[in-house]
Image (tube, rainbow, N blue to C red):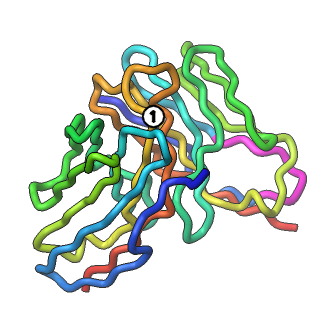
Amino acid sequence: GNSVTQMEGPVTLSEEAFLTINCTYTATGYPSLFWYVQYPGEGLQLLLKATKADDKGSNKGFEATYRKETTSFHLEKGSVQVSDSAVYFCALHKGYNQGGKLIFGQGTELSVKP
Amino acid sequence: DAGVTQSPTHLIKTRGQQVTLRCSPISGHKSVSWYQQVLGQGPQFIFQYYEKEERGRGNFPDRFSARQFPNYSSELNVNALLLGDSALYLCASSLGLGLAGAETQYFGPGTRLLVL
């Protein structure tokens, strides 16, 4: 079946460090891929997306590239800030003929220390 | 423009009771989806509605039901509450079906339900 796997957290980094959060997926066809961020006590905010292979999504210094050959969508940021501390979710969507749902990974908690 | 809104923000119920959660989508969005997020896990899909019709259903018991109104707002109902129904319930809206990028879902702040 369709699934998303993320690296285990929590990830603890110092401010200005480089961030990578790994995400791999299992799905047939060409799903759209997303990263969402959840700050404590809040809902999910869309961070970035990519809808086809080799697309790069980017927003607020975060980037992720849709790699069909490795079924991956790793999240990166060159220099993290304390305000980036949150839980990050990778998700896929296979289209409305597949029931219209997002399938999420388990989330990766990021903690950035000053 | 206003984002997705949900009410109430918090709710406490006892086992066996019934609850109704409400969601208003982003203006112009015709599709609403509901997700359950248990503490420490990723959201799990419950329902998706488009143009007042159910278009997708997740692996949840029949105690869970939903509907969408002509103004595209939606309600999620849960009957005979169990302790395990305690979770954050998220509503997401999207433009609709068949358009490029229309599958992008925007989430509300959620309703936190505690069942005692």
Q: Nearer the viewer, residue B42 or B69?
A: B69
Q: Which residue does the image show at 25% across and 83% down from the upper left?
A: B13
Q: Which residue does the image show at 11% across and 61% down from the upper left?
A: B63
Residue A102: which quarter of the image? Answer: top left
**Residue B8 in the figure: left or right of residue A59:** left
Q: Which residue does the image show at 47% across and 60% down from the upper left?
A: B5
The amino acid on which the numbered mark 1 sits, given as a three-letter code, is: Leu
Residue A14 x/y as whole percent: 85, 59
Label 1 chain ID: B
| Residue A9 makes an appearance in the image | no
- Quarter of the picture containing the C terminus of chain B is bottom left
Residue A39 x/y as whole percent: 62, 63
What segment carries the magenta color? A13-21
Q: Which residue does the image show at 20% across and 39% down from the upper left?
A: B54
| Figure check: A33 above or below A85 | above
Q: Residues within 10 Å of mark 1 (few under 14, many from 20)?
A: many
SS type, badge 1: loop
Q: Kindly identify which residue carries mark 1.
A: B95
| Residue B67 makes an appearance in the image | yes
| Figure check: A9 above or below B99 | below
Residue B64 x/y as whole percent: 17, 58
Q: Is residue B64 magenta?
A: no
| Figure check: B40 above or below B34 | below
Residue A104 x/y as whole percent: 44, 43
Q: Nearer the viewer, residue B50 or B56?
A: B50
Q: Is residue A19 magenta?
A: yes
**Residue B68 in the figure: left or right of residue A86:** left
| Figure check: B63 above or below B97 | below
Residue B94: which quarter of the image? Answer: top left
